[in-house]
Amino acid sequence: MFVALMFILSNINKIEVAEEVIEEISEPKYEYGILVDSFKVTKGTVKQDQTLGEILYANHIDHPQIAEVVKKSKGIFDVRRVNTGKEYTIICKKDSTEKACYFIYQDDPTNYVVMDFTNEIDVYRGKKKVITKVNIAYGEINSSLWIAIEEQKLSPKIAAELSTIYAWTIDFFKIQKGDGFKVYYENKYIDGDYIGIGRILASEFTHNGQKFYAFYYKENENYGEYFDQNGKTLRKAFLKAPVDYKRISSKYNRRRKHPVTGRWKGHFGTDYAADRGTPIWTTANGTIVAASYTKNNGNYVKVRHNGTYTTQYLHMSKIKPGIKKGVYVKQGDIIGYVGSTGLATGPHVCYRFWKNGKQVDPYRQDLPPGDPIKKENKEEYMIAKDSLMQILLNKEE
Ligand SMILES: [Zn+2]
């Protein structure tokens, strides 16, 4: 027994030795596309108020070379934009000088700038490879979608994305016990480190015993959107709000006291409070019919969408240059920026909505849907949808 154990132990040792040998003939090691086998690699973080010049000087780059770096960086990298907390890498020769051969500044998890001191100074940008892996997650909801996502230790971004995808389909305040979700989505990695979720590719949301599907499909090179199992869009012809707002400060109300004049008068718009300068979007495709200033409205834009609907956006700090009468805009295009011009107490957008010439509350309208999948794309969409559906259905409950 003892002998047998000794034999096993000595074999373990042999295996370990064998592994070490394999490591000696390991593959060449690269960082930021630079072969670093014969170099010393040091990582650092930009300290409070530290400048690029200080970091380079500390790594034995002299002042004339720093001046050269500033010159060569023009149009590639703003050397004043070296921010506290950002990571950098110094690559230098394994000798006593410790003079940097390369300095790499990591702009964000993907983008970096290389300053090469090996020959004539060279400055260039690079991108780390992002690896995307797909994953499927599912959960049953007991109280809210956010809590269910948290219980599964999933990114809260999934909850935010799902609530955007289903904004017109499901009222997330009416979620009940027994509702649930399955979601097929991307996870992104750089150098093996998780950096966040990518896109949701498909999802099934069970609400009130009914299943609601969403499949991502790109009809256009630049952007895609979500369609249901029949190719109908999950989007309405109008966005829910014209701005990424903090809160709705006043709703459509036939009778309210005006905050500035104190007079009782109907408020026929919806007020969205947001920071000054926040972009304002047109909520649907249409043609600008007014982009102007009045004492009460301040800077405002009015968009006619079709024979039935018109929208208006008031109190802008600035109308976006180029937005003027006759210009065609698409849903989500920026038309101006949040402000408090005209009769307004604080920065907000007053959003007004006309149906057949009458101001109405957009939240009480049964708004028309956005366009379904185009005829010429329908067949391709159905094939893509079928394979995504299969992935969702294969997931065991
Ligand atoms: Zn208002």
Image: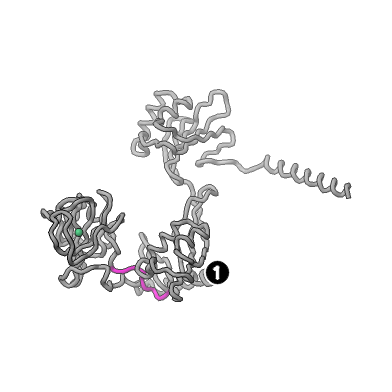
Question: In the picture, which quadrant includes the C terminus?
Answer: bottom right
The boundaries of the magenta stretch are 229-237
Instruction: Classify residue 180 as left or right of residue 163.
Output: right
Please, what is the dominant secondary structure of the magenta stretch?
loop
Residue 166, position in %: x, y?
38, 67
What's the amino acid at mark 1? Answer: Lys
Count of number-bearing discs: 1
Q: Residue at x 14, y 59 (%)?
A: 290
> Which residue, as the protein is rendered here, is positioned at the far left?
295
Give the camera-side residue of 36 and 291: 291
Residue 72, position in %: x, y?
37, 33
Residue 80, position in %: x, y?
35, 34
Q: Is residue 380 visible?
A: no
* Residue at mark 1: 395
Q: Residue at x 37, y 70 (%)?
A: 169
Q: Quadrant of residue 215?
A: bottom left
Instruction: Classify residue 200 as left or right of residue 236.
Output: right
Query: Mark 1: is the Cβ under 8 angstroms from ligand 1?
Result: no
Q: Is residue 17 visible?
A: yes
